[in-house]
Amino acid sequence: MAESGSAVLDRKTVENLVRESLRQRLAGEGRVIKPSSHNGGPNPLVVNVSARHMHVSQEALDVLFGPGSKLTKLKDLYQEGEFASEQLVNIIGPRNRMIPSVRILGPVRNYTQIELSYTDGIFMGIDLPLRISGDHKDTPGMVVVGPYGALNMKNGVIRAMRHVHMNKADMAHYGVKDGDMMKLAITGPCGVVFDNLRVREHPKVRLEVHIDTDEGNACDLESATRIELIR
């Protein structure tokens, strides 16, 4: 007989506890890393580890949270005007596996999209295509459940291609143009060089690299001593 007050944890319970711990660590709006050493020009160079998240159209927001719903700000993100909202949804894949509490980032867009890591895709049973945000041709979908209703996405689930946001001054500093590919060099205990970093131009953005949690964990980005963009 087990001692009073003791409990036996089965495998499923342990897996759920581990997933919840990881979810709490990784969920949300990501981690912005600013090593003291970088090769930024007019603007400081930062790298943002972007956790799984969702972008929604107003139509999708109405389905999930009720007609006329608005995103409410939890905290501002690095880019001006963008924010992590208080709204969370559950996503369900083809194996009926669920990832709970996926955060919606604002403001609303003219399309609906979910961005996951490859690790998330394996768990959910989805062959994630590597895409630039907004490119949804031949991408998988999934079911999204909110407090008001469920949304059956036909497409729009991707792994976001790593990319760097630049304005014209930044592009001039690095000698690149919109759509070019660069390398991101991470110096540190687990230093790596990431190829195929896509340049994305916008006149008002701050210089910022986006990588996902798999990439951030692989190089232990928080221990990085220098970050560098290379043509």
Image (cartoon, rainbow, N blue to C red):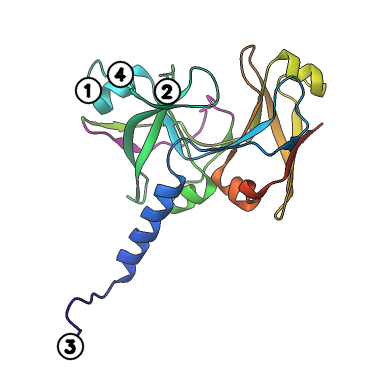
Q: Type of residue at label 3? A: Met
Q: How many angstroms separate mark 4 from mark 1 (CA)?
A: 9 Å
N-terminal of the pair, mark 2 or mark 1, is 1
Question: Which label was assigned to residue 1?
Answer: 3
Label 2 residue SS:
strand
Tag 4 near tag 2, CB within 8 Å: no
Residue 217 position within the rendered picture, expressed as x and y whole percent measured from the top left:
59, 51
Label 1 residue SS:
loop
- Tag count: 4
The residue most toward the front is 36
Is 32 situated left or right of 153 in this image? right
Q: How many angstroms separate mark 3 from mark 2 (CA)?
A: 54 Å
Question: Which label was assigned to residue 175?
Answer: none
Query: Depth check: 114 or 100 in front?
Result: 100
CA neighbours of label 4 inside 10 A, class few (<14), some (14 to 19), many (20+): some
Q: How many angstroms separate mark 1 from mark 3 (CA)?
A: 51 Å
Q: On the image, numbered disc 1 is attached to which residue?
A: 66
Q: Is residue 145 magenta?
A: yes
Label 3 residue SS:
loop
**Magenta-tinted stretch:** 132-147
Q: Type of residue at label 2? A: Gly
Q: How many angstroms separate mark 3 from mark 4 (CA)?
A: 54 Å
N-terminal of the pair, mark 4 or mark 2, is 4
Residue 170 position (above or below residue 212): above
Q: Which of the two marks, 4 or 1, is nearer to us in this view?
A: 4
Query: Residue at (59%, 29%) from the top-left corner?
Result: 132
N-terminal of the pair, mark 3 or mark 2, is 3
Query: Residue at (26%, 75%) from the top-left corner?
Result: 8
CA neighbours of label 2 inside 10 A, class few (<14), some (14 to 19), many (20+): many
